[in-house]
Image (spheres, rainbow, N blue to C red):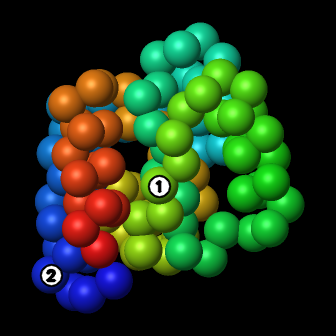
Amino acid sequence: MNSGQNQKIINLLTMCRRAGKLVIGFDAVSESVKNKKAFCIMTASDISANTLKEISFVCSKYNVKIIPCGLTKEELGYYLGKVTAVTAVCDRGFAEGFLKLSENS
């Protein structure tokens, strides 16, 4: 993913967080998926195989799309205030924005 694309994702992630529509951390993300509040899941580029397998299982059960965001856990931590491998987008508009960005990469 190019740096311009990464910057667009960072901008959208930070807007989503400021709007209160971003859930951070595996347990909280899993709950938001199970409670049908998550419209998509963003994963870090260095997510562990086990974490990816677990979140994929939950998402497939509830039909929630997973989008690799191209940022590392540390980079996500820098922009979101918490190091994390998974985030849930709990707003349809923001989720559609992330889907469009992922299709263009």
Quadrant location, the N terminus: bottom left
What kind of residue is marked 2? Gly
Percent of width and height locating residue 51: 77, 56
Residue 101 figure quarter = bottom left
Q: Is residue 49 left or right of residue 20?
A: right
- Residue appearing at x 47%, y 17% in the figure: 37
Residue 83 visible in the picture: no
- Residue appearing at x 29%, y 74% in the figure: 105
Percent of width and height locating residue 98: 28, 50
Residue situated in front as seen by the camera: 14 or 12:
12
Q: Is residue 52 left or right of residue 6?
A: right
Residue situated in front as seen by the camera: 90 or 96:
96
Q: Which mark is residue 4?
A: 2
Q: Residue furthest top?
A: 35
SS state under label 1 = strand
Q: Is residue 85 above or below residue 78?
A: above
Number of other residues with Cα within 10 Å of mark 2, as a class: few under 14, some 14 to 19, many 20 or more: few
Q: How far apart are marks 1 and 2 (CA)?
A: 17 Å
What kind of residue is marked 1? Ile
Residue 30 visible in the picture: yes
Asked whether the residues under the numbered discs 1 and 2 touch, taking CB atoms below 8 Å apart as contact, a structural biologist would say no
Residue 25 figure quarter = top right
Of labels 1 and 2, earlier in sequence is 2
- Residue appearing at x 80%, y 46% in the figure: 54
Q: Residue 67 carries which label?
A: 1
SS state under label 2 = helix
- Residue appearing at x 55%, y 32% in the figure: 64
Q: Which residue lies furthest to the bottom in this view?
A: 2
Q: Residue 47 carries which label?
A: none
